[in-house]
Structures are given as structure tokens and as C-alpha cells.
Amino acid sequence: MDFVAGCIGGAAGVLVGHPFDTVKVRLQVQSVDKPLYRGTFHCFQSIIRQESLSGLYKGIGSPMMGLTFINAIVFGVQGNTMRLLGQDTPTHQFLAGAAAGTIQCVICCPMELAKTRMQMQGTGEKKPFKKLYKNSLDCLVRIYRREGLWGVNRGMLTTLIRETPGFGVYFWAYDVLTRSLGCEPDNRYMIPKLLFAGGMAGIASWLSTYPVDVIKSRLQADGVGGVNQYSSIADCVRQSVRKEGYMVFTRGLTSTLLRAFPVNATTFATVTLVLMYARRSEEGLSDCEPAQPGHHTQIKQQPSSL
């Protein structure tokens, strides 16, 4: 059930957050010498004016297919890891989240590569004169033909560095907040509390690894114009700091945090409610069978466990 709940939560999160992600990527990779956008809100306005509202949803196919599956993996692996670890503690939540973050990188990295390339395609044009990629799948196929498996997994190391601790913080923060807020199933304010905990967990996760995300986006967007600017992660960091200073690591942070709260509030609340509904359905079915002592009490005692 963890996998199904993750799928539903992932799809809901993508629909809410993709426009913010497009803005984040555009700000992260724009040229410092000839910047197109002055900031987050100017970027939003420019994309809508120049490329219409659909410009904000460029590349949504990749995360809609990928993130739905990724969230299924993340919440499935996290749930199973927690069962293996046994005790439900914030530390175990961090370890389970880190394990889930590591495993999903296999899908996350190619998906984000396609998303980034699609988001950069036709920048500033309402109808691009020539589309290099028809869709996300076509993008990955073309990259594979040109650069092989290495090209499809461009940015894998930075993705691992971002996702492993990022997901650890994500689940740790959510667990700590739900315990502190008292998100009991019979609490009348349970849904607002779940939304708040999920949103703040997303913000904490992004703040913990955001500089790595800037480098990942630059490496994955590198070569879009046919010329590769960076030879390695270290070279990307050196060039970025030399040209733009250390503030380069906050590029697009505003749109990321604006996106992080609603997306993760929606995702976590959806997953938690789906799991809660599923467990209640299982309880209803078990009413026809001899009662198992303590089963209902155990669910009530661990509302924060996913």
C-alpha cells in the first residue's frame, strides 16, 4: 500500500509544483553575463508573457511519469526499511529516508535530465522555431544515441549527494513535526497539521542540500547549445563561484521554497491519508474475523509512521 499511496501523492505534488520548478531551473542556469530574468516573479511574468501559460509546464511529462513512480519507490522503500529497523524513532526515519533517496536516484537522475533539457528548450519563445526534442522520452533517446548511457546519467553523483541526505532530512523533519503537533487520526485539525508538517519538511530538505541542486542543474543543462562549458563537478563549482560569487548557490531558492511547501504538503498529506484510509479498510474487513488484541491501539499510537 505504501507504493500506491506514494504514486497518488507524487502525481498530486507534480501538478501543484511544476511551474515553480520551471522557474527554479531557468534562474539556476541563466547566463550571468546576459541574464533574462531579474528574479523569481519577473521570471514567472516573462515566461507567461513570452511563452504563454504552457511555458510553465514545459517538461511536465518527465516528472509526471517519473515522480509518480519515484514517490512510489521512496515511500515503499521507506516504509519497508522502517519495518526492518523495527522501532519508530526520528533517527530511524532519517536512515530509512536516506536509503529511499539513494535507491530512487536511478530513476530520478535521467528524469531530471530530460525535464531540465525540456524546460530550457525554446526559452523566451512562444513557439520555438525549431524543437530539438519532441517530448521527454524523445529527449532521453536522443541523448542516449549521442552520448550513450553516461550521457543519460549525467549528474548522477550530484543527484546522489543531494538525494541521500535530503530525503533523510525530509522524513526526519516530518516525523518530528507530526509528533510535536500531535497528528492523531481523531484530531479535528489533523489535515491542516499534516499539510503544515509536510510543507515544512519539504523546506527543510531543500535548504539542507540546495547548493548541490544548483550544480546538478548546471551540469545537466550543460551542452544544450552544443558546447560543453564544464568538465567536472569541481570545474562547475570553480567557474560558478569565480563568475558569480558564493551567492550563486542561492540561485532560484525563492521559487524552490515557494514550490516546496505546497508540493510537499500535498504529497505527504495525500500519502498519510491514503495509508490511514487503507488501514481503516483493513480494520473493517478484520471485523468479520476474531479480534486481534491491541491492533487498533497500535495504529493510534503511531500516527506519524508511514
Image (tube, rainbow, N blue to C red):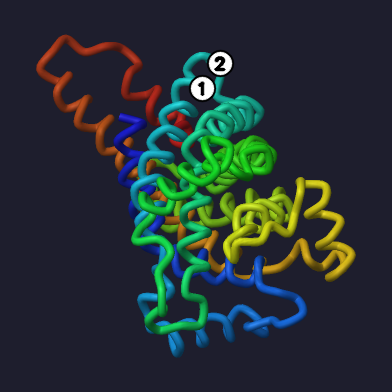
Which image quadrant: the N terminus?
top left
- Residue 127 lies, with reference to residue 177, above or below; the image says below
Residue at the image point whose x is 64% and y is 37% from the top: 160
Type of amino acid under label 1 = Met
Tell me the residue at 40%/22% (across/down): 298
Numbered disc total: 2
Q: Locate residue 6, reporting x and y percent.
A: 37, 39
Counting from the top left corner in percent of width and height, residue 67 is at 41, 46
Question: Which residue occupies the foreground of this view, 3 or 37?
Answer: 37
C-beta proximity under 8 Å, tags 1 and 2: yes
Left or right placement of residue 31 versus residue 167 in this view = right
- The answer to whether residue 193 of the structure is visible from this angle is no
Residue under circle 2? 85
Query: Can you say which quadrant of the picture contains the C terminus?
Result: top left
The part of the image, by quadrant, that contains residue 255 is bottom right
Measured along the vertical axis of the image, is residue 281 above or below residue 213?
A: above
**What residue is drawn where x is 39% and y is 31%?**
300
The percent coordinates of residue 64 (x first, y second) are 35, 52
Q: Answer with left or right where residue 176 lies relative to residue 55.
A: right
> Is 203 in front, or is 127?
127
SS label for mark 1: helix
* Crowd around label 1: few <14 · some 14–19 · many ≥20 (10 Å): many
Instruction: Give residue 82's mark.
Output: 1
Q: Answer whether residue 225 is visible to the viewer in this image.
A: yes
Vertical relation: 25 (above or below) 156: below
Q: What percent of the width, then of the height, locates residue 136?
A: 39, 54
